[in-house]
Amino acid sequence: MIRQARGKTPRRPALKKPPNNSNLKDPVGVYCRVRPLGSEDQECCIEVISETTIQLHPPEGSKVNRNGEFKETQYSFKNVFGQNISQLELFDNVAKPLVDDVIHCKNGLLFTYGVTGSGKTHTMTGSPGEGGLLPRSLDMIFNSIGPYQAKRYVFKPDDKNGMEIQTSVDALLERQKRESQTSAPKTPSRQRPDPEFADMINVEDTCKAEGVDEDSVYSVFVSYIEIYNNYIYDLLEEVPYDPIRPKPPQSKILREDQNHNMYVAGCTEVEVKSTVEAFEVFWKGQKKRRIANTQLNRESSRSHSVFIIKLAQAPLDADGDNVLQDKDQISVSQLCLVDLAGSERTSRTRAEGSRLREAGNINQSLMTLRTCMEVLRENQMYGTNKMVPYRDSKVTHLFKNYFDGEGKVRMIVCVNPKADDYEETMLVMRFAEMTQEVEVARPVDRPICGLTPGRRNRNQAFKEELTRKLEERGGPVNGDLENPSTIEILIQSLPPLPPCNLVDVNDDQTLPRLIECLEKRHRIRQMMIDELDKTAGSFKSMLQEFDGTLMAKDNFIQEQRGKLGDRDRIITGQKSEVDRLEKKVKTLEYKIDILQKTTNIYEVDKRSLQQELETKDQKLQRELSEKRRMEARMQGVVSNTKMKWEKECERRVAAKQMEMQNKLWVKDEKLKQLKAIVTESKSERPERPERSERPEKPERPSREKDMVKKRSVSPSPVPNAPPVQPRHRRSRSAGGERWVDHKPASNLELDTVMQPHVPNAIKVSVPNEKALSKCDKYMLTHQELASDGEIKTKLIKGEVFKTRGGGQSVQFTDIETLKQESPTSSTNRKRRSSGNAPVQQEETTESEWTDVETRCSVAVEMRAGSNLGPGYQHHGQPKRRKP
Ligand code: ADP
Ligand code: MG
């Protein structure tokens, strides 16, 4: 195995990869192929349930599991191929990518794993008429590199897993040497494949890899080894066969090359030029294997076979004509096709003795393979750094670099659905599923050699052009200068030599004739030489001209290349710009998206708000119309009421006017009467007491009789001739006086001890005609608020008379005043009786006196039906006081 740009493989810690390695890793691709049952009536234990999953059913009568129940198990792989999968489909799915990789300088490993008889060999090698992955891979390689194959021996294995290169001349010499050594030439077999395997390599569906480097030359080398009992045997080694004492085959050892890749030291590598040739080599090895197994009594199913296809490639030189003689430019990739030994346990093979030991070893190698996979998986999954026991078996040791280094690894698990294999198949499935979790570093692309691409085509075109030009000028075609016919024609064009046999000594004609002829010929020759020189000169100048044009073209190409480079740079710049813009567009799109979403939200909001607004508007409209209706109604009501009240007022005014007229009339009457009285008793008219004469009055006029006396002085109703008829009175001494105790409801209840005590009284809150008619005394308890915040309570007493008009009239005779602090005032809660403030009382009494006097001159006319209302007023003049 040779890889590009690989230095020493370091002993790596598990999770640390050298930085030059690609960090990309791919899991081992595990595919499952289910072969058809041997016969129809066999029990089938496997069911393909999807493209990636199979299900195992325990066979009938098998041991049930611990829970006493049959358990179906499912296993998933990258792909599961059922019984009807064709070899071609399998190749396209599994091997084709590996072959493609090999052509592009990347290594691949493909192995089949499974129980004996499960179809591993059928899958890898194929069966008659059904070529397996191996012949198909070879075919694809040769189809792809066909026109670019190097001449045999241009590449030469160097016995250290490397490749050397030699010129085509050296290669030709070696070819001739080898062909002379071997009796039969190798090449003819290329045409006719051995009928034994002809139908296995008759691959009708040719496929080709894409992007094959046309400016390289390629060579394919194959080797075929067998690993049996942990020994490696070269199946292509040519050992002289001694029929008398046949030598047992020599085993080979594994070595590590300078790139730390493992290889079988001294292993034969056969250069092959076609699928047929390659498969012939393989078939030879296969035959040898069979013979050896029979001779040595080995069981072939217990050996691993490894077929290695090595592809060497080297770039063409700058002219595009010959391969570049630079060993460092050679790259070698390989595809290993491994047909592993049957994975069944020894017990099944019923082997004994050394066979058993051998089988144990073979099993050991598969065990090691399993262990290696497990450790690898663990290291990768948990970041541990356990040592992977590659060296424990030759198989794992040989492929160590695929897992340690890089490459593509694929495994086809072959299963036979028959019941006998159930147990073994389960183990195979478990191993296969686990293997999928192992990851292998993806191979990196090889560096480009630096020479201009398209060299081969350019060279080809040049050669073709040269041939065409030569043809045009009638020159030699195909370089066929030494064609004898041309020389013959030339010789024929010369004058024929005369017979030159000298029979006579005196013959003097023959020689001169000959001389003449020769001289003629010499002249012609000279002419021809001149002609040739001329032609050569013109050809030379043509060549120079051609060289010039070529140079110019080269320059032009260089120029174009430069321009192309510029364009490339511009394109790269534009690409990065495009990338940037794309990114921007993405961000903007994202922003637009967000804005769109926001807009949507707002629109929804707007719609709901509009709806709300509309409903509110409607409501408002409704309310407005309601209000207008209401207003109209109210206006109607108001105008109605107004009209009603106007009428009522008019009516009342009229009534009042009537009443007032009546009153006026009554007063007029009274005045007339008074006038009459005055004119009748002019001499006895009493004098009104002078106010200045009254200071000697020490007490309040509380006694009624005094009052009566004094009142007689007042100008208006006189006791002797009242305007009314005095009512019948009960004797006072008999205590038969009856009082009307008038206390307006608005009066405050004063909790003073100085309460008037009126026995045998009718208590009223408004003047009551009925009550007045029953009594002959009247007392009004009147309260008012004095300016100093005190409550003034007055007891206004009078006598009740019957008027001529049939009503009652009260003549006030006495006033008692009680001044008291307002019960609501918080500043001074002291109470005063009128006796406690004589001076004030003096004043009050005096003023009240005048007042009462004035009042007493007025008789209150209370008639039935007269509506005085609460605003009861004394008609006293000139001073008016509210009660
Ligand atoms: P293994 O190599 O695993 O021991 P083989 O490839 O030798 O098994 O297969 C055993 C037999 O089964 C062969 O005769 C082969 O032709 C046949 N066989 C295996 N797989 C298939 C298949 N997919 N289709 C048809 N025949 C198969
Ligand atoms: Mg086999």
Image (cartoon, grey):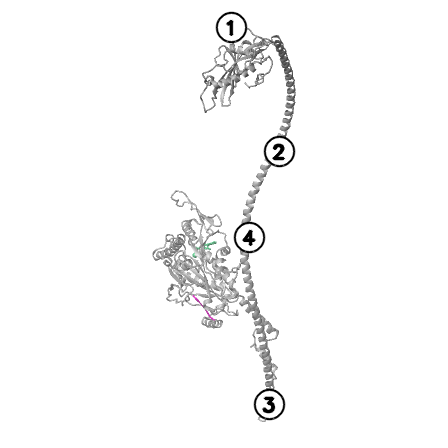
Judged by depth in the image, the label closer to the viewer, 2 or 4, is 2
Q: Is residue 203 left or right of residue 61?
A: right
Q: Which residue is mark 1?
A: 731
Between the residue at mark 2 and the residue at mark 3, the CA separation in whole angstroms equals 151 Å
In the rendered image, is residue 43 in sight? no
Residue 347 image label: none
Q: Decide: marks 2, 4 in contact (CB < 8 A)? A: no
Measuring from the top left, give residue 411's x and y in whole percent: 44, 55
Q: Is residue 246 left or right of residue 525?
A: left
The amino acid type found where label 4 is placed reads Val
Of residue 339 and residue 698, the one placed in the foreground of this image is 698
| Label 1 Cα neighbours within 10 Å, binned few <14 / some 14-19 / many ≥20 | few
Measuring from the top left, give residue 33's x and y in whole percent: 46, 53
Of residue 728 and residue 218, the one placed in the foreground of this image is 728
Q: Quadrant of ligand 2?
A: bottom left
Measuring from the top left, give residue 259's x and y in whole percent: 41, 63
In the rendered image, is residue 878 in sight? yes
285 over 694 or under it: above or below: below
Q: Which residue is mark 2?
A: 621
Q: Earlier in the sequence, mark 2 or mark 1?
A: 2
Q: Which residue is mark 4?
A: 585
Q: Earlier in the sequence, mark 3 or mark 1?
A: 3
The amino acid type found where label 3 is placed reads Thr
Work out which quarter of the rendered image holds the N terminus and state it.
Answer: bottom left
Residue drawn at x 54%, y 62% as measured from the top left: 569
Work out which quarter of the rendered image holds the C terminus and state it.
Answer: top right
Mark 3 lies on a secondary structure that is helix
* Span shown in magenta: 162-166
Q: Which residue is mark 3?
A: 510
Between the residue at mark 2 and the residue at mark 1, the CA separation in whole angstroms equals 82 Å
Between the residue at mark 3 and the residue at mark 1, the CA separation in whole angstroms equals 229 Å
Judged by depth in the image, the label closer to the viewer, 3 or 1, is 1
